[in-house]
Image (spheres, grey):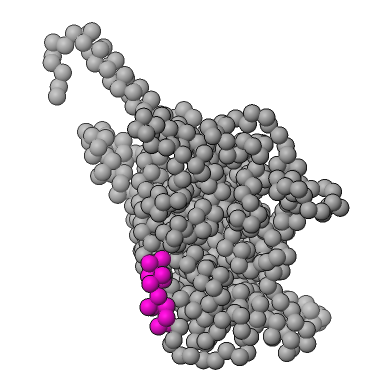
Amino acid sequence: VSEANAIASGSASAKGSTWSRFGRWLAQERVFRLIPFVFVEAVFVLVIIIPFLLMVYISFLKWRANRPFEQAFLSGFDNYAQVLTAPGFWAALGRTFYFAGCAVTLELVLGFVLAMLVARTVRGKGVYITILLIPMMIVPVVVGYNFTMLYIDSGPINQLLAPFLEPFGINPRIRWLSSPTAAQWSVIFSDVWQWTSLTFLIFLSGFSALPKQLINAARVMGASPWQIFWRVELPLLKPAIVIAVVIRSMEALKLFDPVVLLTAGGPGTSTQTIAFYLWEQVWVFNKFSFGAAASILLLIIFASLIFFGIYLLVRQSAEVAQQRMS
Amino acid sequence: MTAPADMTREQALSAGARNTRRQRLRTIVRHAILIAWALVVLFPIYWMVATSFKESGEWVAWPPHWIPHEPTLKNYSQIFVFDTSQKGVAREATEQPFNVWGPLGDSLLICTLSSLIALLLGTFLAYSISRFNVGGKHFRHAILMIRMVPPIVIAIPLLMYYAIMIPLATETVLGTRISLFDTRVGLSAIYIATTLPFVIWMMLTFIEEVPYTLEHAARMMGAGRMYTLRRVVLPLVGSGMVVTFLFVFILNWAEFLLALTLTHPDVVTLPVLLNKFQSASEGRLFGPQAAIGTIITIPVVVLGMFIQKHLIKGFSFGTIRK
């Protein structure tokens, strides 16, 4: 690399306009390598860091959006105390973890089974992959809309259930989104419908990367399919499993779009996720400083989870790199 | 279990037949499960497309009509309004025109612009991370962290920043109030920032496949830095850039929370438009909603099928290698 620098500086003779000298200055490696870095960091600072600092400041103010910002005064940790004692905040947080837990577990199991089945299929494999990956591409808002159409009282789900319900005198026109438990599972199911495709994709790439020789060797040595699965394939799929768990858990905790479209948090507060709760506090009740304090607390809670997730990913990629070396 | 030595030829044959029969049964079960899930996947989409061709009386009919009895294009003509002169109040909500042109244009403009800029910035940064190790060992993971922060946490400060701080700052510095709230520039800026981590990660996997010796050779022969980038690196990562662009475009196209938060009422993206119908004040117009949903869905599903093969690579985050 130093030769390259020598070429660049060697040809830089005394003559040349200011522009070409500037160009040569940029082409030096110690400058050139930092150009994109500076631009990207500028974007992050302007769009994320400064607003974040502003939010920290606002979280210490006593301010609602219906009053002018200039007249707000500092109130210390009042907002934080309010958030910590707000029952809605903790309930929404708990609900979010409950939704994420149920949805991610179902998605992992379903995605794994489907990927395994597709990996062993010969005929029609491409068609299955194309169809099973469609939900991932669909806009979450559209998914929310689609499922409202399915869950309404005169929807096709009720029609399919009618022959089983009518003999027992149950009215088949069930309003799925009107009872708390059913509404919760409706939201979870729409999430499973959409994101099983992502876990399927991750596991499929894991299955297609399995070394064939190793499995054949195990088979020749007399291992049963069951043994091959538990002792050979599953350990090799560990990286894919870790990635699927980390990515899906992070995304599931942000659940917002289908909730707005399907239930708008209702009935009551039974489907309010933490994202929806904060959104409502700020945009419906105008509690800006409360929202800012709640966001910071939420960020602290999530940051610890994010660190843990990133730690898992880093350790995983280090392990894989080591395996590749040996 | 070993077969008895005196097993006849017929017995051996029937054992083999039993084996293939079991295999065939396994294949049938496998296909049955896969077809069942494929139907589950396709059904909600089919229902939306079917609803978009139904008359208003059929939207919530009981028992529901699986196939529109009288297929109509009314829902589409209601959202694709060419004649904007008649803005009078329609007699019924089902006859009121909802113009989709504005939101469609906004969505296309914002998504294309922000994806292109993010692609440009992210590709160059990925290049310098890969070649010069800019930012240190854990920089790439630090970038991924930005992606994992919930958007609601970004949305709250951004609203105050766009609507209050920037107008205040521009008023003191430039003398005029410039607000980024409810502007295309403001929404594009946050989209660039939120998709950059994805661009950097995807482009890293593509760029690291280009051998450095190739560039080194070009540089030794006297090619300049930009010339090497343009003539050696770019052709090799070009297809990767197309895939990354499409992927980021799909992400921006689907974004809802930030668009809902940072725009009202001038700039409207398609997901926000779809959500507007869901509120009680506009009435539940299932038909036009289905038509809008179909229009939002088709381009991304087509694009998605286009990049499907590359997605597997992009989603492995560098830990799965073929």
Total marks placed: 0
Q: Quadrant of residue A48?
A: bottom right
Q: Is residue A83 magenta?
A: yes
Q: Where is residue A272 in the image (x, y as percent from the top left)?
A: 45, 62
Q: Where is residue A23 in the image (x, y as percent from the top left)?
A: 73, 76
Q: Does the magenta stretch include residue A264?
A: no
Residue B276 sits above or below residue B162 on the image: above
Side (left or right) of B217 relative to B133: right
Q: Position of residue B217 (x, y in %)?
A: 62, 61
Residue reaching furthest right?
B85
Give the main secondary structure, helix, strand or loop, of the magenta stretch. Answer: helix
Could you tell me if residue A244 is visible in this image? no
Could you tell me if residue B268 is visible in this image? yes
The image quadrant where one finds the N terminus of chain A is bottom right
Q: Give the range drawn in magenta.
A: A80-93
Side (left or right) of A226 relative to B226: left
Residue B71 sits above or below residue B206 on the image: above
Q: What residue is at 26 percent from the left and 12 percent from the top?
A: B13
Q: What residue is at 64 percent from the left and 28 percent from the top?
A: B69
The image quadrant where one finds the C terminus of chain A is bottom left
Give the camera-side residue of B204 and B42.
B42
Q: In which quarter of the image is residue B161?
A: bottom right
Give the camera-side residue of A155 and B242.
A155
Q: What residue is at 52 percent from the left and 86 percent from the top?
A: A62
Q: Position of residue B59 (x, y in %)?
A: 61, 39
Residue B96 sits above or below residue B199 on the image: above
Side (left or right) of A149 relative to B225: left
Q: What residue is at 31 percent from the left and 19 percent from the top?
A: B21
